[in-house]
Image (spheres, rainbow, N blue to C red):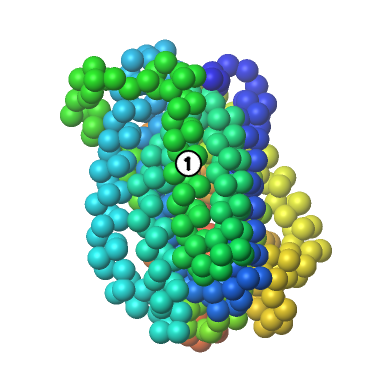
Amino acid sequence: MKDMTVGSPTKIIIQFAIPILLGNLIQLTYTLIDTRIIGVFLGDHALAAVGATTQLSTLFTGFLIGMANGFAIMTARNFSQRDYEMVKTSFVLALLLGIAFIVGISILTLLLLHRILMFLNVSEELMPDAGTYVSIIIAGMVITMIYNVLLSSARAIGDSLTPLLTLCVSVCLNIAGDYLMVGVFGTGVWGAAMATVFAQGITMVLCAIYMYRKYEFFRVCKRDFKNIDAALVRSMLSSGLSMGFMSSLIMIGSLILQTGINGLGNSYIVAQSVARQITNVLMTVFVSVGNAMVTYCSQNYGVGNMERVRQGMKAGYLITCTWCVFVLLIVYSAAPLLIQFVTGSHDAVMINAADQYLRIDSVLYVLVAVIFVQRNSLQGVGDKITPLISSGIEMVGKVVLTYTLVPKMGYFGVILVEPIVWIVMIIPLIMKVRKWDY
């Protein structure tokens, strides 16, 4: 447990973010290894099939993580106020609401999956493998939801080590399962999907047992359900859906962008898939500091200390913008080697396209750094509207630019979409933060 209302903001944020960063890197490393395994054993066709549906599965995962983090805001505030009974109640309600939402959404998506894949412009050639892979991932999303509620609840009380340890276990199981199913048994892409679901299921159970034994206020019993009232449900739904939809709006825009990419051919589908995976690794510092800012701001806002909130944001800017310098050095010195290593492919068209994407977009990562710090800080202090407006701009921008730039400019249009959107979506965040009384 970690009380983030005292001590140096910079030191606290870095200490809290490091385990999150390591966890994210481990998770993303698995994604890269998974791509490598599929590429080596199953070839470019399988890579394209998985890549064609990546944004759909990412949409679901992003919504679940956002919702779980939103639920945890109430847990963090209760913890900072030493109201441990309500910590337990908010944890129970997060589980109930999360499970209810994801079961309904998963069933609806599976029923409409073929139409969704057609909307994504997935070719008939890729449809069988793509449909099989993503349907297994979606069917296992209830496990993903419970898993993320557990992790976000641990972070809400200042424990970022438990999520790191559980992610290590999950990734090890996932890699072993992938190699066994795809490399040894030759199952095809559905084996990789099954390995992911099984790994998360086992890790979820282990994480639940560990948290139950370590923290008394995560030991659920019948009386905890009696403290749930309509006001608490509304408050947690408001926070959870706000952060969930914020993530979803971002991913919906990326999903629409994927429809344009899927029409450019397999080489560009793989190029975008691997470029996004490398981008996710490079941006993991932004994500980790952003996650730290939610808990940091929630706890300090809970005790009414807005000055520490402002100090924390300045520390967040310093950390993330410094990382942008290192990103440029990595991209401009090693991008083609990274792309070839991840895919195991020698497709020159694919490698050049992915390299171009990384070189152009990384120049404006400083905007992404500021966006992550401000958006998550605003969520932490209870602003549910401004981050949604910013994310809505991102979604609309990606939709409009996908249908205007991509048909005219091809893959270069894809490369330009996100930098243009970043420039516009940062505006409402900056305007809101500037209105705070300094």
* Quarter of the N terminus within the rendering: top right
Q: Nearer the viewer, residue 374 or 198?
A: 198
Residue sitting at x 27%, y 46%: 101
Residue furthest toward the left?
A: 230
Q: Is residue 327 visible?
A: yes
Quarter residue 44 falls in = bottom right
How many residues crowd mark 1 within 10 Å: few (<14), some (14–19), many (20+)?
some
Quarter residue 109 falls in = bottom left
Q: Nearer the viewer, residue 213 or 19?
A: 213
Residue sitting at x 65%, y 65%: 36
Q: Mark 1: which amino acid?
A: Ile
Q: Is residue 417 visible?
A: no
Please provide percent x and percent y for residue 79: 43, 19
Residue furthest toward the bottom?
A: 408
102 horizontally vs 434: left or right: left
> Circle 1 — which element?
helix
Image vertical order of residue 59 relative to residue 435, above or below:
below
171 horizontally vs 383: left or right: right
Question: Number of labelled discs?
Answer: 1
Q: Nearer the viewer, residue 334 or 161?
A: 161
Image vertical order of residue 193 relative to residue 125, above or below:
above
Please provide percent x and percent y for residue 4: 55, 21
Image vertical order of residue 217 relative to residue 285, above or below:
above
Please provide percent x and percent y for residue 379: 42, 38
Residue sitting at x 54%, y 26%: 159
Please provide percent x and percent y for residue 355: 70, 72
Residue furthest toward the right?
A: 333
- The residue where tag 1 is placed is 202
Residue furthest toward the top?
A: 82
Quarter residue 74 falls in = top left
Residue sitting at x 32%, y 35%: 95
